[in-house]
Image: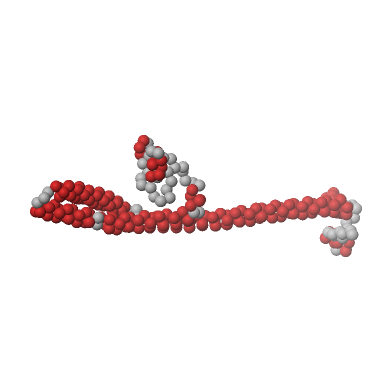
Amino acid sequence: MPSQRRRFRIEEAFKGGDMPMPADGDIGPMHREIMGELRAIRAQMASPGHFVARSAATETMEASVSHEIAEAHALLETYRAQIEQCEKLKVELDLIYDAINRTKREIAVLHGKSFDGNEMAKVNGELGAVVGGTEEATQQILEAAEAIDNASSALAKVTSPDQQKILSEEIQERVVSIFEACNFQDLTGQRISKVMTTMKFIENHIAVMMDIWGGVDAIKSHALPIVDEREGDDRLLNGPKLDGDDGHASQNDIDALFD
């Protein structure tokens, strides 16, 4: 459908008779030039190519706008994906932060109640007292046994009742000293119980820290291989055997060497 052409005011003025049309002799060069330009504009606006150009420009603009909208949507989706990744990372960081805080609390408890100088010195003192008390009691028992052996040998040789009485009293005194020396067992048990309580406390809190970081299996994957760096006889000395321990020779194994 052809669009209605716009009429300019000068044309309305001439058509309505508001402005008199000048005679041919009064028309100047400027008037002719203006009218020529008006006719050219009218012809250009009436031509179909003008509307085609406007339609092509409109389509180009709409395509550009659609492209920009598509790019904006793609950029928005990218930002949304990045925000989701940031949220997941924040959750992981919160878990790590919580694990570190819990581990710090466990270390603080261990340091305050077990690893400080006083507590560890007390543990070392208790173990030293166990070793010293056991050694002293063993020496006392050995001396008493040796004295009893000597007195019993002498008792078999003497015939005087007075000498026999003296030797018998000495044997009784040595037996009493052996009973007294055996009291070390009670003291040793009390001291070792204190040490075991401290070690149990440390073990429990270390187990809690291992659970915080994924349990024993997760910790084992980061543990370095155990290498026995002992040399000579120290490499062969593993201490007394406990029930169920491997790597120790039994008495039957030793007896089998002499069969």
Image position of 85 (left or right of 185): right
- Using the image, determine if residue 12 lies above or below residue 31: below
Which residue lies at the image location 12% right of the left edge and 54% below the top edge? 165
In this rendered view, identify the residue nearer to me: 47 or 11: 47
Give the quarter of the figure containing the N terminus: bottom right
Q: Quadrant of residue 13?
A: bottom right
Which residue lies at the image location 54% right of the left edge and 55% below the top edge? 92
Image position of 115 (left or right of 3): left
Give the quarter of the figure containing the C terminus: top left
- Using the image, determine if residue 252 lies above or below residue 15: above
Which residue lies at the image location 70% right of the left edge and 52% below the top edge? 71
Q: Is residue 243 visible?
A: yes
In this rendered view, identify the residue nearer to me: 16 or 247: 247
Image position of 15 (left or right of 245): right
* Residue at the outermost front position: 159
Q: Position of residue 34 (x, y in %)?
A: 83, 52
In this rendered view, identify the residue nearer to me: 34 or 30: 34
Q: Position of residue 204 (x, y in %)?
A: 41, 57
- Give the colour scheme of this rendering: secondary structure
Q: Quadrant of residue 190?
A: bottom left
Q: Is residue 132 visible?
A: no
